[in-house]
Image (cartoon, helix red, strand yellow):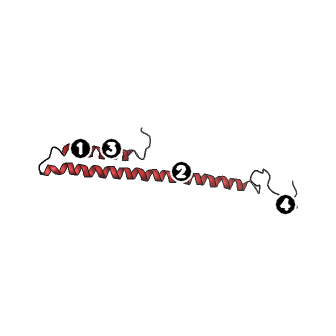
């Protein structure tokens, strides 16, 4: 089974769009006179450009979403570390023992 790649189908879409542009370019010389078949290269070119643009846009959105998820995960882990440090007692950073008042007795 292939690895889970969320951008895989969009890569295929971009490649298909490039192929349609190639076909449109190749067919343009075949149709020098105006006929219904003259629309085929134009249609291929339009659909090819749409495939490329939508595929690239979707891949950019996936990248942005993955970056925001990584940033939020880093923020969450940093926040959890800060909470764990504050649960250790009233110790100041770098100290291992909590600060005690003068009236407190050690047990």
- Above or below residue 22? Residue 53 is below
The residue tagged 2 is: 70
Residue 83 locus on image (x, y percent) = 67, 56
Q: Earlier in the sequence, mark 3 or mark 4?
A: 3
Q: Earlier in the sequence, mark 1 or mark 2?
A: 1
| Front-lying residue, 25 or 54 | 25
Q: Give the distance between the C-alpha atoms of the residues marked 1 and 2, in whole angstroms.
A: 40 Å
Q: Earlier in the sequence, mark 4 or mark 2?
A: 2
The label nearer to you, 1 versus 4, is: 1
Q: Earlier in the sequence, mark 1 or mark 4?
A: 1
| Front-lying residue, 34 or 17 | 34
| Front-lying residue, 61 or 83 | 61
Q: Do the CB atoms of the residues marked 3 and 4 lie less than 8 Å apart?
A: no
SS category of the residue bearing label 3? helix
Q: Which mark is residue 23?
A: 1
Residue depicted at x 37% and y 50%? 56
Q: Which mark is residue 15?
A: 3
Residue depicted at x 53% and y 51%? 70
Q: Is residue 54 left or right of residue 41?
A: right
Q: Give the distance between the C-alpha atoms of the residues marked 3 and 4, in whole angstroms.
A: 71 Å
Residue depicted at x 30% and y 45%? 18
Q: Quadrant of the N terminus?
A: top left
The label nearer to you, 3 versus 4, is: 3
Q: Which mark is residue 57?
A: none
Q: Give the distance between the C-alpha atoms of the residues marked 1 and 4, in whole angstroms.
A: 82 Å
Q: Within 10 Å of the Cα at label 3, are there few (<14), some (14-19), or many (20+) other Cα atoms?
A: some
Q: Which mark is residue 101?
A: 4
Residue 66 locus on image (x, y percent) = 48, 51
Q: Within 10 Å of the Cα at label 4, are there few (<14), some (14-19), or many (20+) other Cα atoms?
A: few
Q: Do the CB atoms of the residues marked 2 and 3 lie less than 8 Å apart?
A: no
Residue 23 locus on image (x, y percent) = 23, 43
Q: Quadrant of residue 104?
A: bottom right
């Amino acid at each position: 089974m292939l690895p889970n790649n969320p951008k895989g189908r969009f890569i295929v879409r971009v490649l298909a769009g490039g192929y349609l542009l190639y076909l449109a370019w190749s067919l343009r010389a075949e149709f020098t006179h105006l006929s219904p078949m003259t629309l085929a290269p134009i249609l291929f070119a339009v659909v090819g450009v749409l495939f490329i643009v939508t595929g690239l846009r979707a891949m950019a959105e996936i990248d942005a979403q993955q970056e925001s998820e990584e940033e939020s995960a880093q923020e969450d882990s940093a926040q959890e570390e800060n909470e764990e440090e504050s649960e250790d007692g009233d110790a100041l950073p770098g100290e291992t023992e909590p600060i005690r008042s003068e009236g407190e007795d050690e047990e």
